[in-house]
Image (spheres, coloured by chain):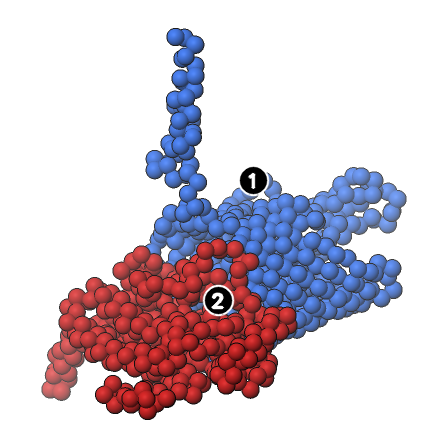
Chain colours: A red, B blue
């Protein structure tokens, strides 16, 4: 009797399994995009992220699991602006998934439509080894990038899975309101930081810094992707000392990432007591969200300049007279 | 009126040329594409172009030899072109000029990916898919030249005119297996420098040279990749000949040689992805007709009775290699290779290379090294090397993974 029942039971179970709607398989190049796809797609997507969040995004070592994931996915999402140009074209060519090749509905470049900064007018490599023809590619750290990337993701997910469009829109709305609140906070921080100065190692924080009105007075790399020479380091130190004499007491953080040549950064920091080393993440670290990461970056910058970080609620904002 | 006719016809013909529009074509002339894209100088349709200049300074010292000293050489100049031909096909050309070999089309191949799935077919002239290093051009290697065992059994560079089938499939979620099979018109074997190896111009299909490779890639932990591979190169029919002291020639035909290899590689990086370790090794065996020697039959002054004495047998060798990348600008490594020579009972040769690579930028590289060769039947030699390699434009080859 038990055996008689088990056959129909297995059949019903297998039918139920088949009836469950398949999730969209999504591969994202960086965790920033992976997090936003998960937020917008909810339980309708299964996301694989290639970078873990700690790498230099220009030099990612691909693994076999990445090739397998791209070969099976429904949607491939990248930042674009040639941020991932060292490894994405080869990955797509090797994985041979026709659905996600450039130009197909399953290929999404989230930076499309966002105005890029520092678009080079001359593409000679005399202007740097890391020359990005369409502009600075580290657009994921722009204050408004979260909403822009999420909008692009919403449009693409809705196209690939129209049945769940309403759910994606609802998820996006929730993220949008959280992002707008955070952006308002960052804008108030920008009001406090506007006109401050900094030194950077590489240009990965350009969007973040300009969004806050912070001026970069020197770049430790003489040109993007070119390591500093002793002569150039001496010039940077001279620039810093000149800024220090013009603004006595002003803080000048030297902003860098984990993979930069931080012995050069240390030399600049040691050149003046007004300089401090400020190590920032240029991608979302593992287990964090894009909003968490941006919040953390802004808090670190506020700390580096010694200004109070704005409270979460605008109503709780102290009067300007009390803060200064 | 007649005097106006000639200029008028000339003007009508010159119009399209000045506009670079559709070319005037007389019947029977080669027809270009209807869209006119092949005769316009639009940058959208130009292939990506690249170049490499590879120079080497060598200071060599050989025990008991007067042939010591410094050499500064432009080792090679390479020009490359890469482009999609259509949505399913891409092609590349690699032309290399070197002082030793003149100007050569080292690779010129078309890859067709239009079958769907992961299958591709490459046709033209290309480097063999054998082990981890034979597909790469010399200037792209981690060391100054290929390990001694590869140079001895396969050659400094090994390419041929042929067709290759290539495919891969997933092995679970964290692994992939790739295989390839190729046939070539000829893959000249490596033999003694005084001998020329050749194959007949037209041959039975069973006498075509071939390569085969099976390789697997697997995630090894969060930041590591492990690769294994099996390779084969078969040469069913070739001939050897050489010029004698009197200007005459001696040769032998109907020879065959097979080389098989096993390779293992492991690479891991730190959390930034720019610092890490790579370890690898490859074991090879060469079987069949390995080389030949001129046998003067005990009459060194009489060339008429000279013959070629072919050396047969199985010989094996290996190399092991380790490299540490400190960051994207500095790396250092060590490579050791040892192999049995062709002559029966001859002692093994070995070579040890230590090197430091300084990437000035992504496109400019300085490499310093020392190489110590210990041929058991010859004099030890030490070489200090400085390699300066510069890449301009885009740089790509048809290298498989």
| Residue B20 in view here | yes
- Residue of label 2: B215
Q: Are marks 1 and 2 in contact (CB under 8 Å)?
A: no
Task: Tell me if mark 2 has few (under 14), some (14-19) or many (20+) residues whose alpha carbon lies within 10 angstroms of its own.
Answer: many
Residue lying furthest bottom in this view? A322
Q: Secondary structure at mark 2?
A: strand
Q: Give the residue drawn at x 13%, y 81%.
A: A9
Q: Give the residue drawn at x 73%, y 68%.
A: B371
| Residue A25 in view here | no
* Quadrant placement of the N terminus of chain B: top left
Residue B60 vs residue B310, the one in the foreground:
B60
Whole-percent x and y of residue B56? 70, 59
Residue B164 sits above or below residue B223 on the image: above
Please state the chain letter of the residue tagged with numbered disc 2 in the rendered image.
B
Task: Tell me if mark 1 has few (under 14), some (14-19) or many (20+) residues whose alpha carbon lies within 10 angstroms of its own.
Answer: few
**Would residue A196 appear left or right of A142 to someone viewing this image?**
right
Residue A303 vs residue B93, the one in the foreground:
A303
- Residues under labels 1 and 2: Cα distance? 32 Å
Q: Give the residue drawn at x 31%, y 81%.
A: A188
**Would residue A322 appear left or right of B270 to someone viewing this image?**
left
Please state the chain letter of the residue tagged with numbered disc 1 in the rendered image.
B
Residue A224 vs residue A42, the one in the foreground:
A224
Residue A294 sits above or below residue A319 on the image: above
Chain-order first, disc 1 or disc 2:
1
Question: Which corner quadrant of the image does residue B279 belong to?
Answer: bottom right
Q: Give the residue drawn at x 39%, y 74%.
A: A213
- Residue of label 1: B202
């Amino acid at each position: 009797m038990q055996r008689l029942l088990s056959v129909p039971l297995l059949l019903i179970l297998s039918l139920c399994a088949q009836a469950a709607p398949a999730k969209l398989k999504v591969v994202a190049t960086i965790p920033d995009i992976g997090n936003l796809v998960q937020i917008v797609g909810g339980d309708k997507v299964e996301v694989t992220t290639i970078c873990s969040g700690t790498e230099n995004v220009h030099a990612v070592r691909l693994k076999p699991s990445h090739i397998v994931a791209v070969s099976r996915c429904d949607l491939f999402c990248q930042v674009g602006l040639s941020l991932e140009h060292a490894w994405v074209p080869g990955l797509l060519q090797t994985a041979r998934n026709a659905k996600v090749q450039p130009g197909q509905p399953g290929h999404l470049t989230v930076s499309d439509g966002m105005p890029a900064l520092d678009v080079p007018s001359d593409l000679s490599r005399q202007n740097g080894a890391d020359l990005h023809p369409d502009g600075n590619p580290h657009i994921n750290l722009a204050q408004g990038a979260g909403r822009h990337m999420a909008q692009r993701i919403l449009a693409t997910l809705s196209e690939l899975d129209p049945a769940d469009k309403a759910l994606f829109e609802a998820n996006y709305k929730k993220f949008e309101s959280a992002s707008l609140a955070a952006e308002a906070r960052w804008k108030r921080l920008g009001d406090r930081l506007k006109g401050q100065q900094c030194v950077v190692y590489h240009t990965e924080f350009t969007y973040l810094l300009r969004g806050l009105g912070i001026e970069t007075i020197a770049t430790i790399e003489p040109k993007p992707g070119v390591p500093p020479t002793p002569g150039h380091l001496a010039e940077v130190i001279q620039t810093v000392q000149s800024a220090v004499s013009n603004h006595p007491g002003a803080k000048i953080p030297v902003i860098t990432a984990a993979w930069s040549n931080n012995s050069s950064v240390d030399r600049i920091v040691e050149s003046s007591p007004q300089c401090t080393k400020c190590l920032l993440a240029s991608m979302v670290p593992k287990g964090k969200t894009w909003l968490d990461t941006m919040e953390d970056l802004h808090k670190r910058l506020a700390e580096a300049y010694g200004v109070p970080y704005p409270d979460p609620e605008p109503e709780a904002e102290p009067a300007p007279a009390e803060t200064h | 009126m007649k005097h106006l006719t000639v200029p008028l016809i000339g003007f009508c013909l010159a119009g399209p040329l000045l506009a670079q529009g559709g070319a005037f074509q007389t019947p029977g002339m080669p027809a270009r594409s209807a869209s006119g894209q092949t005769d316009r100088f639009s940058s959208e349709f130009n292939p990506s172009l690249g170049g490499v200049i590879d120079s080497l300074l060598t200071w060599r010292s050989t025990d008991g030899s007067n042939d010591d000293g410094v050499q500064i050489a432009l080792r090679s100049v390479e020009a490359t072109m890469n482009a999609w031909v259509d949505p399913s096909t891409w092609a590349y050309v690699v032309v290399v000029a070197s002082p030793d070999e003149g100007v050569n089309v080292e690779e010129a191949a078309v890859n067709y990916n239009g079958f769907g799935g992961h299958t591709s077919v490459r046709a033209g002239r290309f480097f063999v898919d054998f082990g981890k290093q034979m597909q790469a051009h010399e200037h792209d290697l981690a060391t100054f030249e290929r390990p001694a065992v590869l140079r001895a059994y396969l050659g400094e560079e090994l390419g041929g005119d042929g067709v290759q089938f290539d495919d891969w499939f997933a092995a679970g979620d964290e692994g992939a297996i790739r295989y390839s099979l190729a046939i070539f018109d000829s893959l000249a074997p490596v033999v003694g420098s005084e001998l020329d190896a050749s194959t007949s111009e037209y041959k039975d299909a069973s006498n075509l040279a071939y390569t085969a490779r099976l390789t697997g890639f697997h995630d090894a932990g969060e930041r590591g990749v492990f690769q294994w591979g099996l390779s084969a190169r078969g040469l069913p029919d070739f001939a050897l000949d050489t010029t004698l002291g009197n200007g005459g020639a001696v040769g032998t035909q109907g020879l065959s040689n097979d080389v098989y290899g096993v390779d293992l590689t492991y690479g891991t990086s730190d959390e930034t992805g720019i610092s890490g370790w790579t370890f690898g090794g490859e074991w090879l065996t060469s079987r069949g007709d390995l080389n030949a020697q001129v046998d003067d039959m005990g009459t060194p002054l009489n060339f008429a009775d000279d013959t070629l004495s072919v050396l047969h047998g199985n010989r094996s060798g290996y190399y092991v290699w380790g490299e540490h990348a400190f960051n994207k600008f500095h790396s250092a490594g060590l490579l050791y290779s040892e192999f049995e020579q062709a002559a029966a009972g001859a002692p093994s040769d070995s070579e040890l290379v230590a090197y430091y690579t300084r990437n000035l930028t992504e496109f400019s590289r300085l490499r310093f090294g020392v190489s110590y060769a210990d041929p058991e039947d010859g004099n030890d030699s030490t070489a200090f090397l400085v390699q300066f390699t510069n890449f301009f434009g885009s740089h790509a080859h048809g290298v498989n993974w």
